[in-house]
Amino acid sequence: MTIDKETVEKVAHLARLELSESEKQDMIQDMSKILDFMAKLNELDTTGVEPLIYMTDGANILREDVVKQEITHEEALENAPKHDKDYFLVAKVIEK
């Protein structure tokens, strides 16, 4: 497949990109290099080769979730610039 200006413009439109004329020429070259590389990869015989899903054989090791109280409610409020007895006070950001 050859990459021409119309193909680049179509891909740019689908990706919602605005490209200058020089950027379009650069994209033609870059996309052509990508397709050439893919064609080179297609020349390889991959019969019997398992697809690579993960780079390592290890599985995720997850820790148990443990509920613990690091600081008290009062200690958390001590660091707040504005607060009342029970809550942080913040500026209103949503108008009705």
Image (cartoon, rainbow, N blue to C red):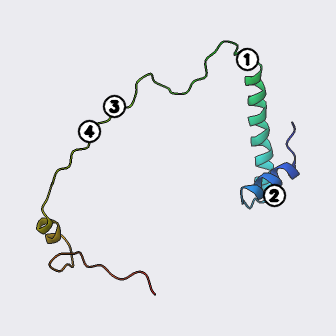
3D distance between C-alphas at marks 2 and 4: 56 Å
Contact check, label 3 and label 4, Cβ < 8 Å: no
Lower position in the chain sequence, tag 3 or tag 2: 2
Q: Which label lies toward us, 1 or 2?
A: 1
> How would you rate the neighbour count of disc 2 (Cα within 10 Å): few for under 14, some for 14-19, many for 20 or more?
few
Q: Which residue is mark 4?
A: 64
> How would you rate the neighbour count of disc 4 (Cα within 10 Å): few for under 14, some for 14-19, many for 20 or more?
few
3D distance between C-alphas at marks 3 and 4: 10 Å
Please name whichever residue, 35 or 29, is drawn nearer the observer in this view of the structure. Answer: 35
Disc sitting over residue 61 in the figure: 3
Q: Which residue is mark 1?
A: 44
SS of the residue under disc 4: loop
Lower position in the chain sequence, tag 2 or tag 4: 2
Q: Which residue is mark 2?
A: 21
Disc sitting over residue 76 in the figure: none
Q: Quadrant of residue 82?
A: bottom left
> How would you rate the neighbour count of disc 1 (Cα within 10 Å): few for under 14, some for 14-19, many for 20 or more?
few
Residue type, label 4: Glu
Contact check, label 1 and label 4, Cβ < 8 Å: no
Residue 79: x %, y % from top left: 17, 69
Left or right? Give the position of 77 relative to 25.
left
Please name whichever residue, 80 or 65, is drawn nearer the observer in this view of the structure. Answer: 65
Q: Which label lies toward us, 3 or 2?
A: 3
Q: Quadrant of residue 44?
A: top right
Q: Quadrant of residue 9?
A: bottom right
3D distance between C-alphas at marks 1 and 2: 36 Å
